[in-house]
Amino acid sequence: MKVLHIAHREFVSFFSTPTGWLVMGGYLFLTGVFWTYMVENYVLQSQDLVYNPAAASLLNLTDYLLAPFYGNCATVLVMVLPAVSMRSFSEEFRQHTMELLATSPVSTAEVVAGKFLGALGFVTVMLTVSLYQPISLAQWGDPEIGVLFGSYLGMLLLSSLVLSLGLLISSFTSSQLVALVLTFAACLVLMVLDWGASSPDAWNARLALSSHLSDLMSGAVKLSDVAYFLLGSATCLFATHQRLESFRWS
């Protein structure tokens, strides 16, 4: 119950501060612009190929519209999610309320889990609001359910990893700006880690975020990809727990 109370408090705080509304509004605006542009471009391409059945058969919703669109959505998430996690512990240190948390009858694990679940709940609401895009598409086309499921699962797992990484970095600084910049930089490194990889089995390709995300976005849900995000999230949350435990006993 303590975890749920902390999670609810963290969740509500995003809607009582400008940061939460700016993050949600920014994400929905950017993805809405991408969606409008890509759908319009798809319609124009379809009209141009109306007298070319062979080429028109190659123009499908999944490869031409859904896959690249949700790839762009994942990039936008990496840009905005550090703003969600930046205040988690940084604000506690800045306002000197971390001492109260450390001495309260709440375990460190409950604090970390509560703040993580609150932030993930906010992102889940944000992703749920964006469902208007595939729902509107279903009125005129036949999008693949597997691709939609894999894309939203991938974005949720991506959010889990980025938020847990952001919580870890936030626990080391009292500056929200520093937490924001360092979290974004760490995510950027993970995104481009496979650049120049000699093979898909190279160590940097296996650790790269993008290589595990691309299969999910195409509708291929693999256990190894899901395990990558879950294990990465659990590792960051455990490291955050250890950091706060050291603060509690220092």
Image: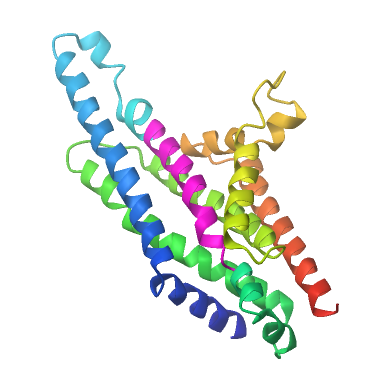
Whether residue 109 sits left or right of residue 42 in the image: it is: right
Residue 66: say if magenta.
no
Query: Where in the figure is residue 129, as x and y percent of width and height?
Result: 32, 58
In the rendered view, tell whether residue 225 sits above or below residue 182.
above
Residue 81: say if magenta.
yes
Whether residue 91 sits left or right of residue 135 in the image: it is: right
Q: What colour scheme has been applied to the protein in the rendered image?
A: rainbow
Q: Nearer the viewer, residue 221 or 72?
A: 72
- The residue under the point 56% across, 66% down is 87
Query: Which residues make up the magenta segment?
Result: 67-88
Query: Where in the figure is residue 197, as x and y percent of width and height?
Result: 70, 22
In the rendered view, tell whether residue 5 sits above or below residue 93.
below
Q: Main secondary structure of the magenta part?
A: helix
Query: Where in the figure is residue 97, as x and y percent of width and height?
Result: 64, 82
In the rendered view, tell whether residue 125 sits above or below residue 217.
below
Q: Nearer the viewer, residue 155 or 105?
A: 105
- The residue under the point 60% across, 39% down is 188
Whether residue 119 sits left or right of residue 144 in the image: it is: right
Whether residue 202 sits left or right of residue 84 in the image: it is: right
Residue farthest toward the right in the current orientation of the protein: 250
- The residue under the point 68% across, 58% down is 169
